[in-house]
Image: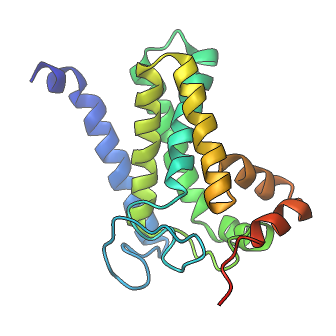
Amino acid sequence: MDFLKRYRWILAIFIAVLAMTGGIELWMGRLPLGPDGRFGLWEGDIWSGENSQRVADPYSFSHLVHGMLFYGFLWLVARKLTVRYRFLMALAVEAGWELLENSPLIIHRYREATIALGYAGDSVLNSLSDILMMALGFWFASRVPTKVTVAAIIVMEIGCALWVRDNLTLNVIMLIHPLAAIKAWQMAGQPHP
């Protein structure tokens, strides 16, 4: 109970940010559960139209990495602030990214420059789950030694590259400065009908 008293204002802000982000996304025309209106916990096929529509998908690992990187970056540049305030800064950045990522500008960029050829944006459910994943990554990084966080990031990045031929690093490269060689390698992993 003491834990809830100490952290209730952060939990209240976290819930408010989720509600506000979800509300804005609904206003933007995002669908709550995706085009089929079905709730689902997992979609493992990045080539499926159901990708980014369920609670989690392979890109959930990228959002865990976001949280870990935000923790490290904010520790470097704002270490005088308490972890709570740094978390709220990371929360604001992640919520802002989710809104931007689901805007026509970024959806079009994903379709144009990355392997997400049919990407239509996240469902509200997936977007809010992405924010939760970032929070879990931030919390993890705040609780374990730096070398454990670095190892976790490396394992997730390499693991996702081998599994789905995409990860946070490749995603950022392809959004900012697409490379034909990377796209060709990623597209070679597409299942053939």
The quarter of the displayed image where residue 119 is located: bottom right
**Quadrant in which the N terminus appears:** top left
Q: Residue furthest top?
A: 80
Q: Is residue 64 left or right of residue 184?
A: left
Quadrant that contains the C terminus:
bottom right
Q: Position of residue 104 (x, y in %)?
A: 65, 71
Q: How was this image coloured?
A: rainbow
Q: Residue 46: image x %, image y %? A: 58, 70
Who's the residue at 53% across and 80% down the image?
49
Q: Nearer the viewer, residue 155 or 183?
A: 155
Q: Position of residue 73 (x, y in %)?
A: 62, 25
* Residue found at the far right of this picture: 180
The reply to whether residue 21 is in sight is no
- Report the residue at 55% width, 12% height from top: 79
Q: Residue furthest left?
A: 1
Q: Is residue 18 visible?
A: yes
Which of 50 and 151 lies nearest the eye of the viewer?
Answer: 151
Is 13 in front, or is 119?
119
Q: Is residue 170 left or right of residue 24?
A: right
Q: Is residue 31 above or below residue 64?
A: below
Locate residue 157, reporting x and y percent.
64, 44
Compared to 120, does 166 lie above or below?
above
Residue at position x 66%, y 48% from top? Answer: 168
- Compared across the picture, whether 133 is left or right of 153 comes to left
